[in-house]
Image (spheres, rainbow, N blue to C red):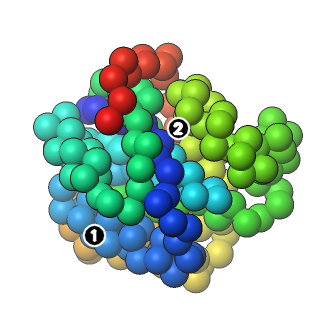
Amino acid sequence: MLTLLYRSDAVSLLPFSALADICMQSSLNNRNLGVTGFLMEHEGTFLQVLEGETETVDGLFARISRDARHRNLSALARWERPGRSFGFWAMNFGPLDDPSFWQGDFACLRDGEAFRRKSSDAETALALLCHAYVFASKVAVSDPVIGGFVMGYPSASPRTPPQNTPSAKPAAPWRPAIIHERSSR
């Protein structure tokens, strides 16, 4: 199972509705491909993790690389391991407008420029994605409306990741030793 971590910058800021549309379409596409992942955006900077079979993830990343809505795309890390670390969703993105997200170690990254600069570091990017993933998972589990919106329906696909049930709380993603990509796309 390949996990790919990348970052990019939006060509122009997207409204929440456009981000939600991208996420919903990606979720449908990813379910069909057997890909899971998580996306976060803060003031025009995107961080994303994708997981699935190597050939599938590489093909998806190649398609993402050609998307004209972003620039400065950089694969920060990739690693192989059995199983998924971000398997709770086919795709979702984190609710970063909640002030409690930006507490503790992440307080200094609330500023958009600091986030943009420091998210180029693979370990920082992965820590942010793990934090956002757990944060969003808690929100989805605790709020049935949000949970239904982001989790989809159990019958969506035989490859659908585990669905939201009161007992299906995701664990924090496994954080690997980072293997840095040498090339940038």
83 horizontally vs 166: left or right = left
50 in relation to 69, above or below:
above
Q: Are marks 1 and 2 in contact (CB under 8 Å)?
A: no
Looking at the image, tell me whether mark 1 or mark 2 is earlier in sequence order: 1
Dividing the picture into quadrants, the one containing residue 155 is bottom left
Type of amino acid at the residue the image marks with label 2:
Pro
Q: Position of residue 12 (x, y in %)?
A: 51, 66
- Residue 185 visible to the viewer: yes
Type of amino acid at the residue the image marks with label 1:
Leu
- Residue 165 visible to the viewer: no
> What is the number of the mark on residue 173?
2
Report the residue at 53% width, 28% height from top.
Answer: 122
5 in relation to 34, above or below:
above
Q: Nearer the viewer, residue 39 or 137?
A: 39
Report the residue at 50% width, 51% height from top.
Answer: 9
| Quadrant, the N terminus | top left
- Residue farthest toward the left in the current orientation of the protein: 55
Report the residue at 57% width, 44% height from top.
Answer: 129
> Which residue is label 1 attached to?
28
| Quadrant, the C terminus | top left
Q: Position of residue 103 (x, y in %)?
A: 85, 47
Task: Select label 1 or label 2 by which is in front.
Answer: 1
